[in-house]
Image (cartoon, helix red, strand yellow):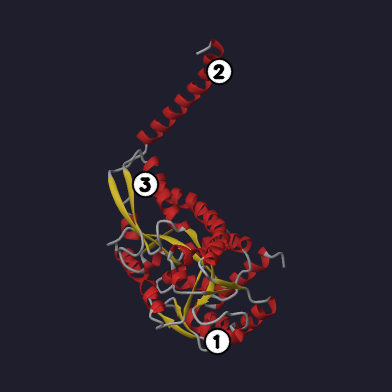
Amino acid sequence: MTTLLRKTLRPSLIAAAAAAAVLTTGLAQAEFQDRTVRISMTGSKDHPAGIALTKTSECVAAKSGGKFKMRPFFEAVLGPEQANLTQVRSGSLDGAVITTAATAPAVPQLGVFDLPFLVSDYKEIDALLDGPFGDRLAGFYGAAGLVHLSFWEHGFRNVTNSRRPITKLEDLQGLKLRVIQNKTFIDTFTQLGANPVPMPFTEVYSALETKAIDGQENPVAFLQTSKLYEVQKHVSLTRHVYSPVNFIYSKTQYDKLGADEQKVLKDCAMENRLVNRQLGREMEDKSAAYLKTQGVAITEPSKAELERMREKTKVVYANQTAVLGPDLINALNAEVKKIRGQ
């Protein structure tokens, strides 16, 4: 090694050693117990949320010096979303990554995200989730025995089916569509003229395969990772609902963690929400291209047709105002107008 190269490397090595010393000192001063926590999700490890959950577990381990370990479980190994919610609330499961729609029975205020055609793009939803309104919603989890760690992303939901393309409102008439076990989703598709069939996602593939139902609604990337394209050949980009994902934690178990452990858990969950969102949005177009190679026809209703659908579902807003209270709905509407500069 030349003298010049040694002189060049020495400052960077010294800096790296200093950084390592600071990190080691910080870990030594922080208090971490040897513990392993279990986190469940119904999606696959290849889904953007699954990848982000794996990265979160790596983040927690790194920031705790390997003491605080997070074990992710994928593909509903620990049960469907509703079962996970019950387990997390009781403390028999440490945490879960589940949709806000599935969490709404415990935290009814999350029903605002089930309102059809609430936001029009990612910029609007990011501002809503990461701003004052998202902070307001986070305050409601404690009463349900939950801790809100961060809002992740499932994406804009689209209608799929095995019978026909959907380009206009009339195409939805009479279709048996699986929906989340959630009243707002049931009301929305009833208003649109479909026949909504609530069921756990774990039953959806077989129901589609046997033609017990005609279709379902989920983001495009999820169709690829869950392989629903094998039993669905029509996708309509209705983008009727943006579906956030909660990273929730059991309050019982959270209260057992030390302050340093709580901070690491929260920090890592917040950091990787951005990973989740970026991957999901990048994957959306890639998944659409992949679905086409698998013989899936993708159509997009015109703005005029989407407006017709929006008009049909206005009654859902009125129903939810009665359920959630005018204060929350008014705050939501005010925040959306502010985001849009209106």
Q: Where is residue 314 in the image (x, y as percent from the top left)?
A: 60, 83
Specify the amino acid type for callout 2. Answer: Thr
- Please tell me whether residue 133 is drawn above or below residue 63 in the rendered image: below
Q: Can residue 189 be seen in this view?
A: yes
Q: Where is residue 182 in the image (x, y as percent from the top left)?
A: 44, 78
As measured in the structure, the alpha-carbon distance from the residue carrying label 3 to the one carrying label 1 is: 47 Å
* Left or right, 126 with reference to 29: right
In the image, what residue type sits under mark 3?
Answer: Glu
- Residue at 58% in and 80% down: 166
Task: Say which amino acid is labelled 1.
Answer: Gln
Identify the residue position indicated by label 3 in the image.
261
Q: What element carries label 3?
A: helix
Q: Which of marks 2 and 3 is in front?
A: 2
Point out which mark residue 191 bears: 1
Q: Outermost residue, right direction?
A: 342
Q: Nearer the viewer, residue 43 or 10?
A: 43
Secondary structure under tag 2 reads helix
Going from N to C along the chain, the mark reached first, 2 or 3, is 2
Say which residue label 2 marks: 8
Where residue 113 appears, as percent x and y from the top left, is: 53, 71
Residue that appears at 36% across and 41% down: 64
